[in-house]
Image (tube, rainbow, N blue to C red):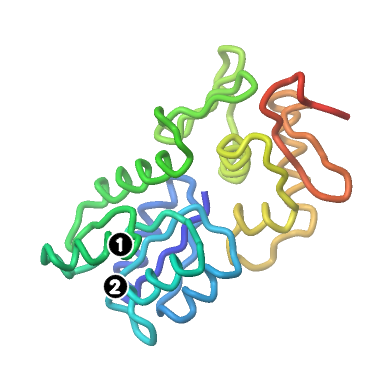
Amino acid sequence: MRILLVEDDPSLASGIRLALKPEHYTVDHLTDGETALNALKNEPFDAVILDLGLPRVDGMEVLNAVRRHGISVPILVLTARDAVNNRIAGLDAGADDYLTKPFEVDELKARLRALLRRSQHQTSSVLECRGIHLNPQTLSVVYQDQEIALSRRELTLLHEFMSHPGRVFTRDTLTRLVYGWEEDVESNAIEVHIHHLRRKLFPEVIRTVRGIGYVMDKTLQENRP
């Protein structure tokens, strides 16, 4: 899952990124509202953690603009503005959840998990597709009653496919979802991860769509060469 963190407090942002890293999120960090709004218009994200007290463009303005542009990405507002009217204003503007500072990291993680489940219409935190079971909380993958050991990148990639079965991803989209804005990504990195997933699970787990990208079909019957 690719998360956009918009927070201008460097120590808080560093702490959040450190806390979310073991959860296998790809976290991209921005410090002002204007840059965040541009990123949200042009990049794919699974969720946003948005501070309201931002420089250049206030977080509330970002929130309003995002919804005006029809961007439906789940947004968790993170702010020191704890008055009831502020919370109501944020939710009415299109926030999906609201967490006031200071907060417990475990609560942030739990709210983020719940927000992502709701956005994907999941009733359970465990993803299941093609006989594969992935638990985002324990970071475990089980196939044919065997736990499968995956690297962090492989797990992130599999999570993306299982969260959106039937969706065709381009290689560029997958690269951004898995690596974010990290530099020095090998040009064949996604192909290597997919090769490993096919070897560790089964060859048809991810299908190549020629000239477009990759897809995890919902059922074996839907799979095509």
- Vertical position of residue 212 compared to residue 71: above or below: above
User: Pointer 2: residues within 10 angstroms few (<14), some, or many (20+)?
Assistant: many
Q: Name the foreground residue: 104 vs 214.
A: 214
Instruction: Say whether marks 1 and 2 touch (CB < 8 Å).
Output: yes
Q: Total number of numbered labels?
A: 2
Whole-percent x and y of residue 214? 76, 42
Whole-percent x and y of residue 145? 56, 12
Q: Residue furthest bottom?
A: 56
Whole-percent x and y of residue 204? 78, 26
User: Pointer 1: residues within 10 angstroms few (<14), some, or many (20+)?
Assistant: many
Whole-percent x and y of residue 97? 29, 53
- Name the disc covering residue 186, or none: none
The answer to whether 148 appears left or right of 24 in the picture is right
Q: Name which residue type carries label 2.
A: Leu
Q: Secondary structure at mark 2?
A: loop
Q: Name the foreground residue: 58 vs 191.
A: 58
Q: Residue at x 48, y 59 (%)?
A: 27
| Quadrant of residue 55 within the rendered picture | bottom left
Q: Residue at x 19, y 56 (%)?
A: 103
Q: Quadrant of the C terminus?
A: top right
Q: Name the foreground residue: 137 vs 150.
A: 137
- Vertical position of residue 147 compared to residue 1: above or below: above
- Vertical position of residue 138 compared to residue 176: above or below: above
Q: Name which residue type carries label 1.
A: Val
Q: Residue at x 60, y 39 (%)?
A: 164
Q: Secondary structure at mark 1?
A: strand
Q: Name the foreground residue: 197 vs 40.
A: 40
Q: CA distance from mark 1 to mark 2?
A: 7 Å
The answer to whether 127 appears left or right of 206 in the picture is left
- Vertical position of residue 10 compared to residue 113: above or below: below
The residue that mark 1 highlights is 77
The residue that mark 2 highlights is 52
